[in-house]
Amino acid sequence: MGKPKPKKDKPLLACKVVVLEDVNQLAKKYRGKFQLTLKTIKKKGYENCIDPAQNMLLVQWETLLNKICHEDPVIAVENFVDNEGPPDNFTYVRQNITHGLANDLLDPNFLAGCECFPRCSQNTCSCPKNSGHKFAYDRNKRVLLPPQSPIYECNKRCKCGDDCPNRVLQKGLTVRVCIFRTDNGRGWGLKTREFIPKDMFVVEYVGEVITSDDAERRGKLYDERQQTYLFDLDFNGDPTFTIDAHEYGNVSHFINHSCDPNLRVFTVWVDTLDPRLPRLGLFALRDIKQGEELTFDYTCGQKESKTSNEIKMYCACGAPNCRKYLF
């Protein structure tokens, strides 16, 4: 018999990982899977890190978000800036809340579906053609259309499958993201944890669907607080409805404004063909690097409601071309 081959030592890998948990929590999670030597390093400039109680609240909130979004890529939460915990009076939702306002507009009996099976193509799909427009996506599901173009996706009446290239926004969040506390006074923000190629769909802007009259009333309150969460659905002129992401929303609730954004907005129709009720998709305006904050220009559609005192919304984006004011 030959001699047994000596076992080779497993290679050691040194990693620095930014985490919310302490060493004991990490050990419980991973020591059964890996041989770990753990130590914490306090990063310079993070002297005001949150206390353990707030830390635990953020860990619990992160767990809750991923339970709600079990079909989506993992969402991380981090705060290395101050003692702010999870936002108050905010409910995470994956789809718009209509409160029954638009039930008649969302009746599937008024939808027209395509006959494509098993998948659609630019040459076969009738969904955009029925509305006089072009097929929106390439085979990698990147948007092909110029800005301001409407997008008509396949719907529940279509015969194509879930992997159809014309089903994009309706599939939900596409990348791993992190809700993080900004260090320049802009509150919470959202950054990507992976590279996003240009023209790729990232996330839908989600919230409450309210009437424009309600939006006008809420907008005055938000202006006084220097908050902006209202987005008019005004593709065809004066809006009937507005999306309010203040109390209900997804990760798009945390996306900050920039005068030099890396996301742009497209109006997308899925559940209805009524021009008054599109959905809002945020797509990559350019290649976006891993770790980069996600931003879009609020002035492209969010509600402006001035009080009699002409309250101005100040901009703190810091871009070289910053306009200083949102409105």
Image (cartoon, rainbow, N blue to C red):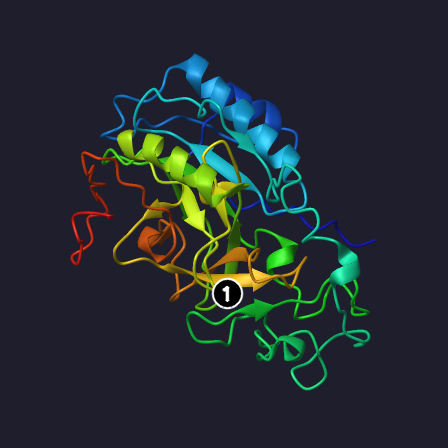
**Of 32 and 274, the residue lying toward us:** 274
- Residue type at mark 1 is Met
Q: Is residue 144 left or right of residue 96?
A: left
**Of 3 and 218, the residue lying toward us:** 218
Image x and y of residue 74, in percent: 57, 43
Indicate the quadrant where residue 88 lies.
Answer: top left
Q: Is residue 36 left or right of residue 183?
A: right
- From this viewpoint, is residue 293 visible? yes
**Of 247 and 57, the residue lying toward us:** 247
Q: Is residue 312 left or right of residue 289?
A: left
- From this viewpoint, is residue 13 visible? no
Image x and y of residue 7, in percent: 65, 46
Indicate the quadrant where residue 290 lies.
Answer: bottom left
**Of 295 and 315, the residue lying toward us:** 315
Label 1: how many Cα within 10 Å (few below 14, some 14–19, many 20+): many
Q: Secondary structure at mark 1?
A: loop
Image x and y of residue 163, in percent: 72, 65
Residue located 19% across and 39% down the image: 310
Q: Is residue 136 left or right of residue 42?
A: right
Tag 1 residue: 200
